Amino acid sequence: MGSAVGPGGTGVNLPALRSHNAALVLDLLRTAGASGISRLELAERTGLTPQAVSKITARLRADGLATEAGRLASTGGKPRTVLRLVPDAGHAVGLHLDRDELTAVLCDLTGAVVAERRAPLDLGAGADAVVEGAAGEVAALLGGVSPLGVGVALPGPLDHTLGVLHRVTGFPEWDGFGLRDALAGRLGLPVVVDKDTNAAALGVAVGPGAGPGSGGAGGSFAYLHLGTGLGAGLVIGGAVHRGARTGAGEFGHQVIQLDGPLCECGNRGCIEVLCLDAVGRGSVAEAARVLGAGAANLVGLLDIDLVLLGGRTVAAHEEVFLRGVGAVLEERARREGGGASVPVLPAPGGARGVAEGAAQLLLAPLFGRGEG
């Protein structure tokens, strides 16, 4: 029987329900770490019956995803067996295609990086050359490991659902190219494509060390990435916000100076061109103030809890950007009288944060995480 009727008369897909419940259990095994968690606690924290938890954990053990981690001391009854996730039972590749550099990581089920490669990249060299180069780096990274798939992160705009690129700023020749299908055909593996900022934001929300202080664990935050371009990843209520056409987060192309310099997108006075021009002139403090103005717009629009800064340009002048963006947000908070300013912190993950987030495009759904 493929479905049942719930109390309200709505059809319930039992295989999908089982998958959802398994994801709940897997996520708790993942967050419990090496010390593990008992079946009784799994039942208490998921709301599932002990019988359902036993069936799920039996399947997970049979599939090699879970194993025993010892026993809890008895409190009068039978000692309880503790289970843990097996991290190397599965892997995912995260691939960051920047405008001039490729970073590839191999992550285990916990999101920990177990292998890494870097190589120069020319995003303007043409689709065939980029796909071939990326496929070669992934093959070299795997070393015989058969992964769940490959998550690819690169500058937008793009269609996350179809894996098709739009007019990537500075590289209009990519418009309409089906990167997902091309790379999947070349590698023989499932491929998911997303914007670099969305991938990095997903990594923060669900990756190793995710918690309230990092922007994870159900929080709402903006990840602002300033490297060779500028974009934003938005996480609302713990899930990446992509929008109806998966185009949300084109933060760099807000116009804040109507008669400003011409941007590669065709507009004038975009935050991206103003920031990069200021950095190019050596006026990093000015770039930080411009970025702060954009961050203040986001805070005002979305009432987010936290602003995270990442990208190579930020990394090269981290204290200046943190101080400059923070000052703009503090001034906004003083004007509005609404209490403390929204904190501004460096994004976790460093130079490979986008690539690690790209791997989470494959990993997070296994644990029922990161999607709205």
Image: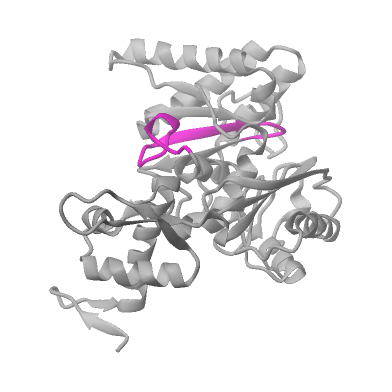
- Check if residue 222 falls in the magenta segment: yes
Q: Is residue 19 visible?
A: no
Is residue 64 something that shows in the picture?
yes
**Residue at the limit of the structure toward the bottom, as seen here:** 1
Across and down, in percent, residue 276 comes to: 70, 24
100 with respect to 351 (left or right)? right
Quadrant of the rendered structure where residue 237 is? top left
How far across and how far down the image is residue 25, in percent?
A: 35, 59
When the figure is inspected, residue 25 is found, relative to residue 256, above or below; the finding is below
Please name the residue shown 66% across and 24% down the image.
Answer: 315
Range of magenta residues: 209-230
77 lies above or below 53: above
Q: How many marks?
A: 0
- Across and down, in percent, residue 229 comes to 68, 34
Quadrant location of residue 354? top right
Residue in the image at 34% along x and 52% along y = 37
- Examine the image and state in which quarter residue 226 appears: top right
Q: Is residue 214 magenta?
A: yes
Which quadrant is home to the N terminus? bottom left
Is 60 displayed left or right of 168 in the figure? left
Colour mapping: one colour
Query: Who is closer to the viewer here, 106 or 315?
Result: 106
Residue sitting at x 38%, y 50% = 36
> Percent from the top left, x then y, of residue 93?
65, 55
- Name the residue furthest left: 7
Residue 367 or residue 99, whichever sits in front? 367
